[in-house]
Amino acid sequence: MDFRSPRVDGFQLSPSLTFF
């Protein structure tokens, strides 16, 4: 996962979809 992604907040909801 890229924690530098602008959708870091989405990581808590869907860690598998935080590649965008």
Image (spheres, rainbow, N blue to C red):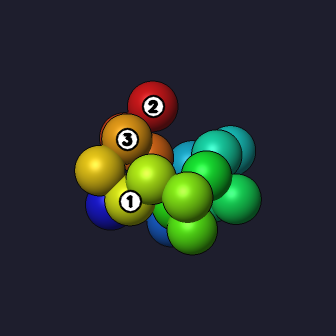
Pointer 1: residues within 10 angstroms few (<14), some, or many (20+)? few
- The label shown at residue 17 is 3
Q: Amino acid at mark 2?
A: Phe
Residue position for label 2 = 20
**Quick one: which residue is furthest to the top in this view?**
20
Point out the frontmost of discs 3 and 2. Answer: 3
Q: Position of residue 13 (x, y in %)?
A: 55, 58
Determine if residue 4 is in view: no
Pointer 2: residues within 10 angstroms few (<14), some, or many (20+)? few
Q: Are marks 3 and 1 in contact (CB under 8 Å)?
A: yes
- Which secondary structure lies at badge 1? loop
Between 7 and 12, which is closer to the camera in this rendering?
12
Marks 3 and 1, how far apart in space? 6 Å
Residue position for label 1 = 15
Between 9 and 14, which is closer to the camera in this rendering?
14
- Which secondary structure lies at badge 2? loop
Q: Which quadrant holds residue 17? A: top left
Q: Amino acid at mark 3?
A: Leu
Marks 2 and 1, how far apart in space? 11 Å
Q: Amino acid at mark 1?
A: Pro
Q: Are marks 3 and 2 in contact (CB under 8 Å)?
A: yes
